[in-house]
Amino acid sequence: MMKKIFILLLSIFFSGSSIAADTNTELLKVDWSFKGVTGKFDRSSLQRGYQVYKEVCASCHSMRLLSYRNLGEKGGPEFSITEVKDIASSFEVTDGPDSQGEMFTRPGRPSDRFVSVYPNVEAATAANGGAYPPDMSVLVKSRKGGADYIYSVLMGYDEPPANLELDDGVYYNKYMDGNKIKMAKPLMEGIITYSDGTNATEDQMAKDVTAFLTWAAEPHLEARHKMGFKVIIFLIILTLLVYFSMKRIWSRIDTEV
Amino acid sequence: MSEHTYTPSSKFGKWFNDRLPLLTLGAHLSEYPTPKNLNYWWTFGGILTFCLVTQIVTGLVLAMHYVAHVDMAFDSIEHIMRDVNYGWLLRYIHSNGASMFFLAVYIHIFRALFYGSYKSPREVIWIIGMLIYILMMATAFMGYVLPWGQMSFWGATVITNLFSAIPFVGESITNWLWGGYSVDNPTLTRFFSLHYLFPFIILGLVILHIWALHVPGNNNPIGIDIKKPSKDTVPFHPYITIKDLFALLIFLIIFSGFIFFSPNILGHPDNYIEANPLVTPTHIVPEWYLLPFYAILRSVPDKLGGVILLFASIFILLALPWLDRSKVRSAVFRPIYKQFFWILIIDVLVLGYMGAMPAEGIYLLIARVGTIYYFLHFLVILPLLSSVEKTDPIPASISDPVLIR
Amino acid sequence: MDKGEKKTNRRDFLFTASYTVGAVGIGATIWPFIDQMNPDSSVKALATTEVDISQIEPGKSITVLWRGKPVFIKRRTEAEISEAQSVNLNELPHPEKDQDRVKKTEWLVMLGVCTHLGCVPLADKGEYNGWFCPCHGSHYDTSGRIRKGPAPVNMEIPKYEFVDNNTIKIG
């Protein structure tokens, strides 16, 4: 009895602390392929997502914790080695100093970090009307609601309600905190042409780029799920063995365990 | 330990044991007579030892990759998560391990509260345990600062500012803690150093905790004194070791569930944003295991008062063996105490919940009632119960159903 | 008697299985703790370096960092080349033909680490016009071969290739 009450209380406590999140509007829910115990990323979606990032988001948002080599690593978009090299070399990387003490630019290599448009946070803030476009490396993990939240914000642009005054350069978004966002609606149907021929609808682009950002924030998600599955099955087998061993040992005396 | 007459069988063993009686210690630990009626609530001591070792070992290897500098700490954590071989696994074990450690320690503490394990002759075990708990909180708090995310920074700011409430010397103390005029690089490096040190002090205290336990022996669900060794006891090995192992494995399955399938659910998303001294997150909350104390802190409208109450709520536990003077240990035979035990659990959970809520309106009111009740429980209810409660008759021995008194 | 034996066997099997599975688990748990000390993926990604050699005059050398170690890239003069090629292999502690140590005779690319205990030898020093290690007095010739002193073998040639006439890719 005592156990039951305790477990009940614990579960109330844990569910309680997640409810504790101040819920604004109910986020849009997507049945992501990476959700769940055996969740995996959809490679082609990640590859398209990278294209959306590169052609749309990257003009303001940096991803300074990622390297081009990551794009070819297992569990990610898995571009081929040549594709990764091509992607990397399409960027100009500042390197140096050379033997004369000068900085110089060269084509990027897979080992280079993603090149940012702005040299630092202050420059990015100044160029975007005083609002820093956050670095996207761990963006999904740094927002309550994670992937669903990012997707919801991308899809949440709407006409402001009549009673809402918006300053210049401020936009209405159903899912943003305070419903005000300084980023103009980034995704418009046909704004890019997918290289794999997929129809670039707003919803498709939002899903692809969100999947890509989720991978970027948690690049070892697939390895984690796979290992977790094995570990838990292993633990259950060992637990059963130990349970029966325990029964056997305690059967030497009259007490029940 | 002194009555041991263990003689090693091998000649070398005897030679060695005469010089350093490790084998005698081993034999003592293995034969240690343990009440045979211990239930699963008693397996958390072993689980906690496992947690401590896990935290030390994973922490040790994480420290090989972590950089304690405000410009690099956040990136070095991400380096561990992205590049280091199995780095993500080691970090998730360590970060979730802290939560599991506290989950286990709370169960362990409430088990002691229910079965009266803090009462004579086990007061010293209880006090050492409380010191371990206080050090655990300090260690966990400093560890949470190391990733240098927004919650790290602002958590550190808020907690260290508690000391500024001390009259006259408050500011000097906070500046001394920070090594500057705000939480900054000197703070981070000293927290890292202490976060590395404290677990080893905890380890030392754990050894004392177990030593102190082995003098009177375990309490048990009935709470009566038992003769040892006797029909009421079993040797620690293999009976208790296998039972502890079984419980540990169940615990590990839950632990693995967190590590592999929702490693960030117990953390706060804001900590994946690098620390920014210019912007405070809208809603600062400590890790879940500190929430009840946080609620107590915020329930007092006065700065100094809140800090005093916060520390009082922890240190009052040290005096528990002298607040509850009832001769009967186990709540099984204390019908009224049993009720109050459950009310206390609910009170602490409610306080925890209020700690996660904004400190305003109804939440603040409930937190205040909860805080008052918390102190009422220890300062009024327990001493009063000691004299007025009519306890049930208790059995003479574990295997003997005859009741006495 | 028979029955008792059977029981023992079953018990032994259960315990043996528990021990075995437990040991496998511990073994598998230890591996991440060991592997985390191996070179990580960011280190491995830097395993190749491209070097521009168009600015190096004959007789001069540059030192570049590769995997945290110095690599000497020397553009050898005709005299140095013929000196390196004309050595009687029998005189060498570690006989290697100069041709086997270079891809283009003009360019010597080698790991600038003394094979004795890992110091960096000084260029254009020593009794053989090559390199001299100041730590314990090892003399290397113009092909980087050990001639005198405690070092056991010649300086190591890393994996490298000429991407074009002006660029070497090391690694």
Image (cartoon, rainbow, N blue to C red):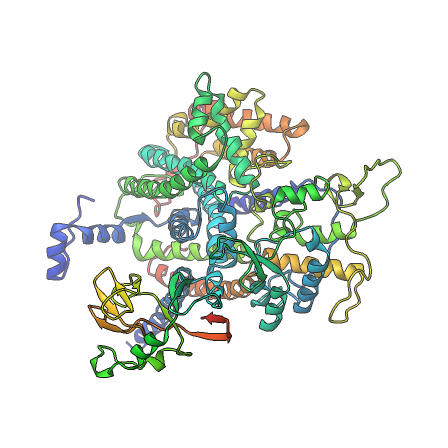
> Where is the N terminus of chain B found, in terms of image quarters?
top left
Considering depth in this image, is A201 or B134 the residue closer to the camera?
Answer: A201
Say if residue B45 shows up in the picture: yes
Considering depth in this image, is B163 or A7 the residue closer to the camera?
Answer: B163
Looking at the image, the residue that sits furthest to the top is B168
Residue C11, image x and y in percent? 35, 70
Left or right: where B175 falls relative to A148: left
Q: In which image quadrant can residue B296 be found?
A: top right
Tell me what residue is drawn at x 22 percent, y 77 percent: C93
Residue B380, image x and y in percent? 48, 22
Residue A109, image x and y in percent? 56, 64
Q: In which image quadrant can residue A173 be found?
A: top right
Left or right: where A102 falls relative to A115: left
Say if residue B377 shows up in the picture: no
Left or right: where A141 falls relative to B74: right
Decide: is B131 above or below B259: above
> Where is the C terminus of chain B found, in terms of image quarters?
top left
Decide: is B329 above or below C166: above
Considering depth in this image, is B373 or C126 the residue closer to the camera?
Answer: C126
Considering depth in this image, is A71 or A233 the residue closer to the camera?
Answer: A71
Q: Count the marks: how many?
A: 0
Residue B333, image x and y in percent? 44, 36
Looking at the image, the residue that sits furthest to the right is A162
Tell me what residue is drawn at x 73 percent, y 70 percent: A195
Left or right: where B238 falls relative to B147: left
